[in-house]
Amino acid sequence: MGTLLDEIIEYGGEVFGKEHMETVRECVQCGKCTGSCPSGRITAYRTRKMIQMARMNLREVLSMYELWFCTTCFTCYERCPRGVKVTDIIRTMRNIAVSEGHMSFSHKKVATYVFKTGHAVPIGEPQMKLREGVGLDPMAPTTQKFPEQLEQVREIVRTTGFDKKVGFDWETMKLREELEEGK
Amino acid sequence: MAEKEYAYFLGCITPNRYPGIEAATKKVFKEFGIETKEMIGASCCPAPGVFGSFDLHTWLPIAARNLAIAEEMDLEIYVTCNGCYGSLQEADHLLKHNERLRKKVNEVLGKIGREYKGKTKVNHSIVILHDVIGLDRIKEAVKKPMDDVNVAVHYGCHFLKPSEVRGHGSPERPYILEDLAHAIGAKTPYYKDKLMCCGAGGGVRSFDAPTSLEWTRQKIVNMIEAGCDCIMHPCAFCHLQLDRGQVEMQNLFGIEPKMPVLFATQLIGLAMGFSEKELGLDIHEVKMPEKLLK
Ligand code: SF4
Ligand code: SF4
C-alpha cells in the first residue's frame, strides 16, 4: 500500500478525476482556507492542518473527531489561491476514515434511514397530516411509498457494500452496534 | 396549456417535514404556466455532504438512479433544496465528463434495470423563477407588495458552490435572491456574514447538534441586528436548520424563536396573494408576523 497521500489521490481520483485530487500537492500552507472557514471559528477544526496532515501521511487524521466538523460549505475550495480542491479532499479523507471503521453512531443511524425508507429524513404520521393540510397526498410518490422502488436503492447499497461498512443487519434491520449493546 | 413541464425532484425534507415548500412551489409555478410532474420512486438525493462524506461510491449511483427516473420521463428536473441541487447537479456533471465513471455507475444501475444516459438537466427552482418566468412577470403578479419588509437573504452553500459546476457567477457576489426579493418590493439589507453557511451541512447537524446550532445562532443574531423581518432562502435543509433550529436554540441558548423563515416561493406566494395556509406557513415553528400577512 502506498502512502496516505497516494491513497487520497487514488480514491478521490476515481470520482473527481486524478488531476482534481493532485491539487493537494499545490498547497503552500498559506492558511486562507482556515481564515475562510466558518467551522474553524467555533470549533477546533483547522482546514490547513487537515490538508497538511494528509500531505505528511499522518494517518491519525482519519480518526480525528474534528475531521467531521466541516459542513462542506466550499468556501475554502473557492478561495484557495493555489486551486486546491479542499472540500473534495476532505470528503475523500472522510470516505477513507469510514472505510477504516471511523464513523459515528449518529451518522450510521442516518445511513440506516436510507436503507429502511430510501430517505435520510423519512415521513411519519404527523407529517402526513401536514401534507393533507396543504392539499397534497399524505405520502409523496417516493421510495417510502413504493416497496419495489425502495428495493432498488437497497440493491445499490448491497452492491457497493456500504451496508457492510455501516454494519447493518438486514434481518433485524438494525446496526450491529445496536444489537450488541441491546440499544 | 402548460408553457413548460418539469419533473420535481422532492428529496426528503421538503415532502417529509415542510410540505408547504412543495405546495407553494407547485402553486406559484402553475400561476406562471409551469407544470410539475411527480418522479415516481425517487429517493433521497442522497445528501452530498453526508453520503458524499461516507461513501462516494454509494452516493453516486443513488443520485444517478434519481437522474435516470427524470430521463425516463424525458424531462428536466427542478429542486427546492440546495442539498438536492448539490447532489444531483454534481453527479450529473461528474458522469457527463467521465466516461469510465459512467460505465462503472451504469454497471451498478444495470442490476436494477436502470441506466444513466446524461439527457436531463438539473435546475434550481429559484433559477426558474429568475430566468424562465422572469422578474417582469413576477412584478406584474404582485398583489401585496412587500414595501416595508426587510428580507434577510440567505443563500446556503450548494446553490452557489462549487461555482465551476453551479454556474451562477461569483459566489462572493450573488444576486438571484436579491433580484427576486426586490421584484416583490422588499428590501434586502446587508447583514454580517451574510454568505455564511447555516451550520447543518456535511453531517454536522447529526454529528453534533449544539455545534451546528452555534452557526445558526450567529446568523440569526446578525439578521436581527440588521433589522431584518424575515429570512428568504432557496434550501429545504437550511429551512429545517433555521426554523426548527430556532426552537432548539431556545432550549440551548435561551434565545426566543422570532425570525420567520420562508422558502423563496413562499414569500413570493404571499406577495401574489396566496394565504398563509395555502403556502403551509402556519406549520412552521416560527410563526409569521402580521407585517407579512396583512
Ligand atoms: S488556502 Fe489552499 S494553499 Fe492555502 S493552506 Fe489552504 S489549501 Fe493550502
Ligand atoms: S468547506 Fe469545510 S473546510 Fe472548507 S470552509 Fe467550509 S466548513 Fe471549512
Image (cartoon, grey):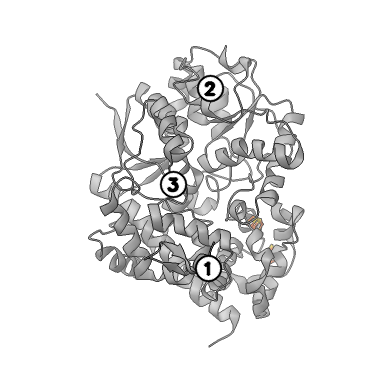
Q: Nearer the viewer, mark 3 or mark 2?
A: 3
Residue at 67% x, 77% y: name it: A60
Q: Is residue A163 left or right of residue B293?
A: left
Give whichever of discs 1 and 3 has the lower sequence position: 3
Q: Which residue is mark 2?
A: B183
Q: Which residue is mark 1?
A: A177
Tag 1 and tag 3 share a subunit? yes
Quadrant in which residue A154 is drawn: bottom left
What percent of the width, then of the height, locates residue A179?
49, 67
Vertical comparison of B236 with A95: above or below: above
Mark 1 Cβ and ligand 2 under 8 Å apart? no
Residue B193 at least partly seen: no
Which chain letter matches label 2? Answer: B
Q: Amino acid at mark 3?
A: Pro
Residue B141 at least partly seen: yes
Which chain letter matches label 3? Answer: A
- Secondary structure state at the residue bearing disc 3: loop
Q: Is residue B203 left or right of residue B126?
A: right
Q: Amino acid at mark 1?
A: Glu
Q: Amino acid at mark 2?
A: Ala
Vertical comparison of B196 with A36: above or below: above
Question: Spatial distance from mark 3 to mark 2, Cα to Cα?
Answer: 35 Å
Residue at 55% x, 60% y: name it: A107
Which chain letter matches label 1? Answer: A
Split into quadrants, the picture shows ligand 1 in the one at bottom right
